[in-house]
Image: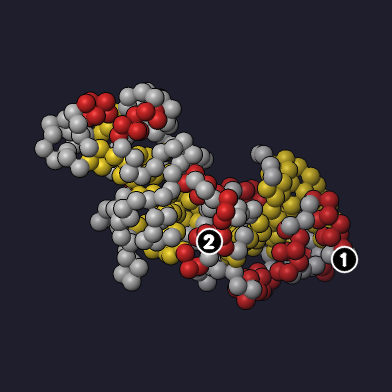
Amino acid sequence: MRGIVITIFTAFVTIAGQSQELSTADLISLTSLTPQKFEQAINKKGYQKADMTDRGDAVVHVFNPRQKNAEEVKIKRYAEKYQQGEEQFLVYATSSLSENNTIREKLRKEGFFCPVDSLLYNGKEILFQKKNMVVAAACLVSPADTIYSFRFQYRNLPAPARVNFADDLLQFTSHQHLVTTFGAANVTKDQYYFSDNEINACTVLFPNTSRQAIFIWNDEMNLSDLGSIVIGGSVRGGGTENEMLQVSENAWRLRNGIRANMKLKELLELNGKDFTIYGKESDYFMKADEATEKGDIDFKEIAVIMGCLNCSSTYLLNKEKLSAEDALDSNLSMHVLMLILYPPDNNTKTDEKTK
């Protein structure tokens, strides 16, 4: 999605149009319209269709202001309606700093959450978020001009009653989406400590309850762009007033049946074959090996961290890897301590954060 912003600027930075401004209310209203109704509505605002093109998987409808005279081409504006699968969004761009400031100020007054006040340049986005709408604001400076862009997009969020499995939580890609769906009282901002030296902004859903889930954000400033979800285990948070405690029995389970506190025997039965677990000679101690010959569980998409009640003196763990079946045959009391879920298209996860 971020790449689309740069593409937009590159393709349209030279487009000039008349000075028809679209208000913040106009843009919010236009965002939800189908392309056909959008064209009818934006025509009434003084825009005409200039092009329809494909950009990757998206179909883009481009609209420019109708030009009237030479005096009215000083400000550059355009609007684009995107269709990408079932999703659609609207991009509005202007070269007017005053118009940019007016839109940003109006968004704040309308209750949109934004973590920063200053402009970001060269395609970097800041997000304005309210309920199920996200507005991504960006700015690109070039020798020819400065263009300010706003991408308006609605997200279809599920009703809480339809969120039954841990996998369902992957639909929520920002802190604001969680607040909208589950209520502010059930959602807390915090910091997650992977180690003393590695801290990441996070959101805690249902803190200190059996439904606790930790959302780790790639975009820490905007609390968006989901990196992973942590279920179960002894979680370390940075909050003082809202200190996160270990939840003895986490109620979330995956659609495939995996849950926190599941016994090793049950996990083996669920996988349908043996798998390996990292030992003390590995940096990923007690983590199920993602390179294990594939059974019914894909350990690459789900990081499974094991716990053990009687492993302190066993020799089996004194190597890089051990067989889960060998651990079971040796009566090691292993269980699933923690689950880390990754979005299907997340290519940024690293083993460093599953140690």
Task: Write the residue at 41% across / 39% down.
Answer: 258
- Amino acid at pointer 1: Asn
Residue 262, position as x, y percentages in the image: 34, 40
Number of other residues with Cα within 10 Å of mark 1, as a class: few under 14, some 14 to 19, many 20 or more = few
Is 143 displayed left or right of 337 in the figure?
right
Is 36 displayed left or right of 81 in the figure?
right
**Element marked by disc 1:** loop
Residue 277, position as x, y percentages in the image: 27, 32
The number of numbered discs placed on residues in the rendered structure image is: 2
Marks 2 and 1 sit apart, C-alpha to C-alpha, by 52 Å
Task: Write the residue at 32% across / 27% down.
Answer: 275
Viewer-proximal residue among 75 and 127: 127
Viewer-proximal residue among 199 and 170: 170
Q: Which mark is residue 182?
A: 2
**Element marked by disc 2:** helix
Task: Kindly tell me whether residue 213 is visible in this rendering.
Answer: yes
- The residue at which mark 1 appears reads as 69
- Amino acid at pointer 2: Phe
Q: Is residue 20 above or below residue 352?
A: below
Residue 310, position as x, y percentages in the image: 17, 40
Q: Nearer the viewer, mark 2 or mark 1?
A: 2
Viewer-proximal residue among 166 and 197: 166
Q: Is residue 329 above or below residue 198?
A: above
Number of other residues with Cα within 10 Å of mark 2, as a class: few under 14, some 14 to 19, many 20 or more = some
Residue 146, position as x, y percentages in the image: 63, 62
Dot placed on the residue nearer the N-terminal end, 2 or 1:
1
Task: Write the residue at 76% across / 66% down.
Answer: 26
